[in-house]
Amino acid sequence: MDQFEYGNFLLESLGRAADIALQYYQKVSGIAKAEDNNQVLTKADLEIGQFLIDQIQTKYPGHNIIDEEIGALDNGSDMTWVIDPIDGTSNFAAGVPTYGIMLGLLVGDTAVAGGIVLPSLNKQIYIAEKNKGAFLNGQRLRVTEENSLRSSLLAYGIDSHQEMPDLTYMECTTLARLIQRIRNLRSTNSAFDLAMVLEGRFAGCLNRTSKIWDNVAQDILVKESGGVYVNFKGEEIKYANALQRTKENFEFIALAPQFLDEILEVVRTFNDDRGIN
């Protein structure tokens, strides 16, 4: 890890952000966001987000920043930090320990560095940089080498679509098809699921409903752990014009590469059911 350019910054910033989260853990409640009942906000989200913004502006004052709660801060740079102050806020607000804090860095449209900390799970910090690997506590991370999907655990995060209830029903049909291919389904719908992929404990995790801050740190961590990080069509996710895409929906598949074809075969039926090419 000595070769990391951003490693110390990620470790220090995420470690201190985790301390803030732990000060509030099981002591705050969340309120649903007016624009999306699936999304919850707590005082901790705001404080952690501002802390990470302050850290970035002190260390890298010319860089752009995207924060889930504050929005986009455009400094005209090619470098953009992307903050998810609490990923799994509903879990956090309910006193459930499966939540995380994510911080990623884009150069242009490509994720080049990122980290995740799980505050309530021993403050484990996962960090990665492009072409330099991914690490947890100094140990190299690798996705699973298991070759049988039927012998594997898979995570799938799903939110309701109140405005399009049929979409939720169709997604559950796809989920049922996936369950028939795996050993068991797991889902915290948080950074914890992604961490289990990085450690090789889950074959992968999938989500059709996320935002840019849910993806950038995950993207580089998965790829540097030997996995694939693509959308539900199997395409690489690009983040061009990131500052203008804070409202856009992103979908992702984070997966050990040997399972990609089989997973795509199943999830593409969802697009077929909706008449999407």
Image (cartoon, rainbow, N blue to C red):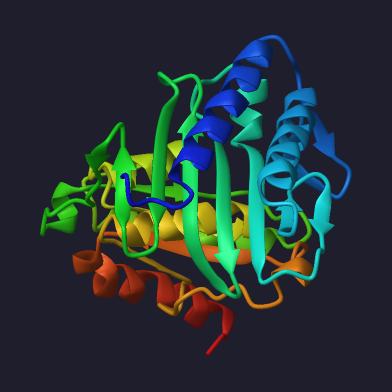
Residue 145 rendering spot, x and y as whole percentages: 12, 54
* Left or right position of 38 against 224: right
Residue 209 rendering spot, x and y as whole percentages: 61, 58
Residue that appears at 66% across and 12% down:
23
Residue that appears at 80% across and 44% down:
69
In this orientation, which residue lies closer to the viewer: 148 or 46? 46
Residue 44 rendering spot, x and y as whole percentages: 73, 25
- Position of 129 relative to 19 (above/below): below
Residue farthest to the right, as pictured: 34
Q: Is residue 54 visible?
A: yes
Residue 127 rendering spot, x and y as whole percentages: 41, 44
Residue that appears at 44% across and 80% down:
235
Residue that appears at 70% across and 55% down:
161
Residue farthest to the bottom, as pictured: 277
Q: Is residue 100 visible?
A: no
In this orientation, which residue lies closer to the viewer: 91 or 43? 43
* Left or right position of 53 against 99: right
In this orientation, which residue lies closer to the viewer: 111 or 62? 62
Tag count: 0
* Left or right position of 64 against 230: right
In this orientation, which residue lies closer to the viewer: 231 or 272? 231
* Left or right position of 225 against 268: left
State the image quarter where residue 199 is shown: top left
For the N terminus, the quadrant is top left
